[in-house]
Amino acid sequence: MDAMIDIETLGIRPTSKILSIGVTLFDSNKVQTFTELLQTTHYRLVYQRLVYDEILEKRYLSDTDQFFTSDQSTLEFWLQEDEKNGGFRDLRNSSDAIGQPLDNILCDLNSWLIECKKVWSNSPSFDCSILRHAFTVYGLKPIWKFWSERDLRTLLDIKKVNKKEFNPEGFIVHRADHDAAFQAMLVQIALNKEGA
């Protein structure tokens, strides 16, 4: 079993605040649809109501928290995303918007990955680095080892798979569970592609 991890954050530094985590468990020897993979996806929101309220009110989060940071350019990106599709406004008003403590979510993440041999992400230098920092802050260790991390971008480049050719029905970009399922689908397509 493999896992695809996707996170949404308030920055691009390894110390960035995490908004949400999506993890899709999948068999890399199969090719499944986005909808099938979404059914094997775990999704957790981190303190969403507070974070999204601050974004929507255009009050930039301060970096007073000594362990996690946010970047103004990323906050501005999320504001633009909200103007396009209202996603943050919808989350703020949903019962899911309460979120969970990050340390609990990190423990959940480890439990989801117990059977996984490989941990994929769109770039381990982003997703896995930020997660490793969060584990360290809470005195926890990720269950996976660095040598089990795999890079989706490299795989797609080597196998000559253009992700823009795929647009699954119901896919919501920048939603961690959807991104994880979509990226797992791309791994399956690339690894099972004939002649590449």
Image (cartoon, rainbow, N blue to C red):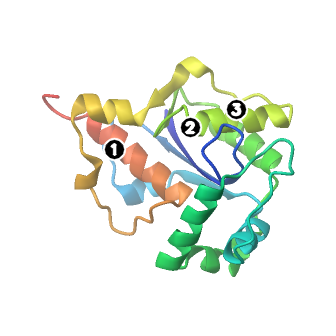
Q: CA distance from mark 2 to mark 1?
A: 18 Å
Instruction: Name the amino acid, label 1.
Output: Leu
Identify which residue, 1 or 12, lies in the foreground: 12
Q: Position of residue 84 (x, y in %)?
A: 47, 77
User: Mark 3 — residue?
Assistant: 132
In which image quadrant can residue 35 be found?
bottom left
In which image quadrant can residue 10 be found?
bottom right
Task: Tell me the element at label 1.
Answer: helix
User: Mark 1 — residue?
Assistant: 186
Vertical relation: 72 (above or below) 95: above
What residue is at 53 percent from the left and 61 percent from the top? 175
Vertical relation: 56 (above or below) 194: below
Q: Position of residue 123 (x, y in %)?
A: 48, 36
In this rendering, the count of numbered labels is 3
Q: CA distance from mark 3 to mark 2?
A: 10 Å
Mark sitting earlier along the chain (1/3): 3
User: Mark 2 — residue?
Assistant: 126
Q: Residues within 10 Å of mark 1 (few under 14, many from 20)?
A: many
Assess whether mark 1 and mark 2 are in contact (beta carbons under 8 angstroms): no
Mark sitting earlier along the chain (2/1): 2
Q: Position of residue 38 (x, y in %)?
A: 47, 57
What residue is at 63 percent from the left and 33 percent from the top? 129
Instruction: Name the amino acid, label 2.
Output: Phe
Q: Quadrant of the C terminus?
A: top left
What residue is at 44 percent from the left and 31 percent from the top? 151
Q: Is residue 191 visible?
A: no
